[in-house]
Image: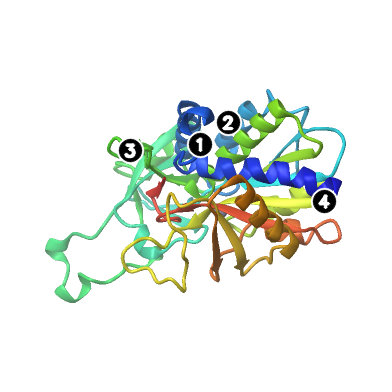
Amino acid sequence: MYTRNCSRKSLVTLCALSVCAAGLAVAPAALGRDRVETLLQSLADAPGPSGYEEEVRAIMVRELKPFATQISYDGLGSVIAQHGAKGPRIMLDAHMDELGGIVRRITPDGFLSMQMVGGWLDQALLGQRWVILGSKGTVHAVTGIRDIHVLPPEDRSKVFPRNDIFLDVGAKNAAEVVALGIGPGDAVAPDSPFAVLNGTQRYLGKAWDDRVGCAVVVEVMRRLAAEGHPNILIVAATTQEETGIRGAHTAADVVHPDIGIAIEGGVAGDVPGAHPEETQARLGAGPGVFLYDFSEQPNRRLISLIKETGQAEKIPLQFDLVSGYGDDSAAIQASNGGVPVVNIVVPVRYTHAHNGVIW
Ligand SMILES: [Zn+2]
């Protein structure tokens, strides 16, 4: 009963805040729109491909520190922020990393090839702006695109494979590239500044998977620290999710959770061409609760508790099963001898691309 009550309180806040972060559909004034919007912007704009999460980590530490009774790290750089000293250990997880690339090679004529990091579609890569995190600071780049004026007609509707793609930093030769302070091993992140869409409370930006989750866990920590709770709440902002759910694994080794709740960017199906058997989530229609993905299965009693909580608190919930989707809750589920988990999402349009939309 104790655990159940404790969990209910966390979950109520979680669900409410998922809605809040996704567009403030519940109680905009009470939830502090300006603060959340500012946080969403700083998190989305920070470059942090898997394994290069430093800038995002600095934001998370800055935001969590005022409320955490203790902050530690795992060996892969995940942030582990604790509030409360007694009760069940509730691991509330969001991952800091995003898709990106790593510079592979500098060509003699001053272009760079790139190893992609995370699950990219080849057609998402061409003609995009990127930043390279070099030793002398950020370098701007574009993935060059073949010019239609010289392309044979049969190639004009073709997808160009990722290994044909190159980065152009405006250098004349390899020496100029080196002088910019960039080279093999440097991280490459999408360059897609945050924007509020046309006077709405809908947001355009990169990396909503999972920076929107990072914003939600910060808000949950903030509110539960103020309201009080009978749990050991442990917020884990993890690394390297997109390359194999690695940071959640190592963070769970440190946390020893009794319950795991991952907060993620979900896959919205409310766009032209989407099929309801693929995903059913809609923007602005409430937090999504995953009933299945390829990496984890949620605990059924935890799902029941979330449903009851949603009804009692009048929080609209969406339920989804997405076969091509994995998340940090998988690593938490398989830790500490087996842990009840759930993955709760803020639906996102166009994940794993330069520009995503949330409400
Ligand atoms: Zn994610």
- x and y percent of residue 284 in the render? 43, 49
Label 2 or label 3, whichever comes before in sequence order: 2
Whether the residues at callouts 2 and 4 have beta carbons within 8 Å, the answer is: no
Residue identifier under label 2:
59
**Cα–Cα gap, marks 2 and 4:** 27 Å
Residue type, label 2: Ile
Report x, y in % for residue 189: 45, 45
Mark 1 residue element: helix
- List x then y, in percent, for residue 39: 50, 31
CA distance for labels 2 and 1: 7 Å
Gap between marks 3 and 4 measured at Cα: 40 Å
Which residue matches tag 4? 258
Q: Amino acid at mark 1?
A: Leu
Residue type of the residue flagged with mark 3: Thr
| Residue kind at label 4, given as amino acid type | Asp
Residue that carries the numbered disc 1 in the rendered image: 43
Look at the picture and state if 358 lies above or below 334.
above
Of residues 180 and 333, the one nearer the viewer is 333
Which percent across, then down, holds residue 173? 33, 44
